[in-house]
Image (cartoon, grey):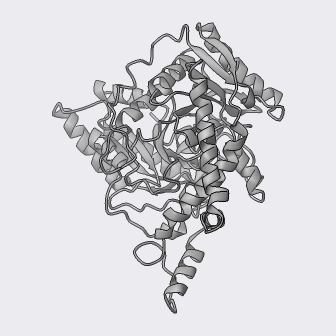
Amino acid sequence: MHNKTIAQISRDLAAGEYSSVEITQHLLDRIAQQDSTYNAFITVTAEQALAQAKAADENRAAGNASVWTGVPMAHKDVFCTNGVLTTCGSKMLSNFVAPYDATVVSNFNNAGAVSLGKLNMDEFAMGSSNENSFFGPVKNPWNHDCVPGGSSGGSAAAVAARLVPGATATDTGGSIRQPASFCGVTGIKPTYGRVSRWGMIAYASSLDQGGAIARSSEDAAMMLNVMASFDPKDSTCVDQAVPDYTANLNDSVEGLTIGLPKEYFRDDLSAEMQQQIRDAVAEYEKMGAKVKEISLPNTHLAIPSYYVIAPAECSANLSRMDGVRFGHRCEDPKDINDLYKRSRGEGFGEEVKRRIMVGAYTLSAGFYDAYYKQAQQVRRLVKNDFVAAFKDVDVIMGPTAPSPAFKAGEKTSDPVAMYLEDIFTIALNLAGLPGMSIPCGQINGLPVGLQLIGNYFNESRLLNLGHQFQQATDWHLKTPAGLV
């Protein structure tokens, strides 16, 4: 049963092939037996999951079922869940039990889904490898010596290892798309404001966006149908009607124009990686799409802009982690300054401290105009590139990451090299655009992701393109060697 997709499980439950309790127990047993290998889960909520599954079966028997009733999934540990440990992968919140549900969690609960637990992540979503978690690194199911990507590495690894059919995730600079690429699964980051951030613990508020990781575009569409909603509790959430993201999956792509940014096919992108992406684009040409070379001239400015804006916002957001109201508190503080210093010094990991210090510096008097203000001006230039490009093309494609998954420990001593892992994904967060990664090939037995970039609120088109590719190819059906 663990090889079933969300769509298959939903249909099987409707047909009475098995009960929600049966599929839930099967996956819980699988997590208990195998997650020690991957470390994808921080908390497994077995008792709660079985209670939800039992209620789902009762609702189905009473004729009150929806497509999600009784379908298992899991949440990235950045979403607050009432009565459940919510850690953000940090010692700072290692004892924090959320007193309420995030809107995304409430939406899945209301839809009848069954939550199996909370998934591992880079601390406060800061990282590209899932090596920054207080609870230990997550391993890539395709090669246990490699990272799964980050920060949503637990979500991607759990789906790739068939521990869950789908998982929530978040994306601040590529944290859904890059781990989806590394783990050979499908991940979508919606338009900024499409999914409520209420109850999603903030890293960089103008960049963070909740999304989904699943086996297929169809499954991702089913998840986004639940996640996308207007939420008056989130001032950045857009009050716009939510379409049925599954309705247009089978639309033809004939006549669509695909833009290939010349900046994404750089000299330092390996010939093998370039060929994988061009082969994937050729599949769309076979379906009748047209390809056009475009330019996004300010692409090279995205990373320096992001690594000023994101740390600045994180330094403000994480100031609430002070050892006073919740979370880690040092023992026997001498005074308030000692409480702050030691609680934060003990509670935050090295990467989080690094970004807080950079952010505080760029926002300080005398440096705000030189750094933060200028970075925001560059952000506008990056956005304008996309606005201009979408006048001529319907969708933009390119690599999700510059390489397949790299070895654990390979880049931990070089933060800049780690930051460059997000070179193709960060610009979308700066612009607020939707993006998606789908498996499109392999290099040395490791998955490669194709990134699809859409215009604002055009998630339906991305999901349609992903689905059509997955009808024509079988890369999304591949499983890691030795997986049982």
Q: Nearer the viewer, residue 251 or 340?
A: 340
Q: Is residue 300 above or below residue 333?
A: above
Q: Position of residue 38 (x, y in %)?
A: 60, 50
Horizontal side of residue 247 vs 152, given as left or right: left
Q: Nearer the viewer, residue 36 or 113?
A: 113
Residue 94 seen: no
Horizontal side of residue 340 vs 17, given as left or right: right
Residue 89 seen: yes
Q: Position of residue 291 (x, y in %)?
A: 66, 14
Q: Residue at x 40, y 75 (%)?
A: 325
Q: Residue furthest bottom?
A: 334
Q: Position of residue 14 (x, y in %)?
A: 29, 27
Quarter of the view holding residue 350 = bottom right
| Image quarter (top left, top right, bottom left or bottom right) of the N terminus | top left
Q: Residue at x 45, y 12 (%)?
A: 251
Q: Is residue 161 above or below residue 478?
A: below
Q: Position of residue 42 (x, y in %)?
A: 50, 57
Quarter of the view holding residue 280 = top right
Q: Residue at x 61, y 56 (%)?
A: 372
- Count of marks overlaid on the render: 0
Q: Nearer the viewer, residue 301 or 353?
A: 301
Horizontal side of residue 23 vs 411, given as left or right: left
Q: Is residue 267 above or below residue 52?
A: above
| Image quarter (top left, top right, bottom left or bottom right) of the C terminus | top right
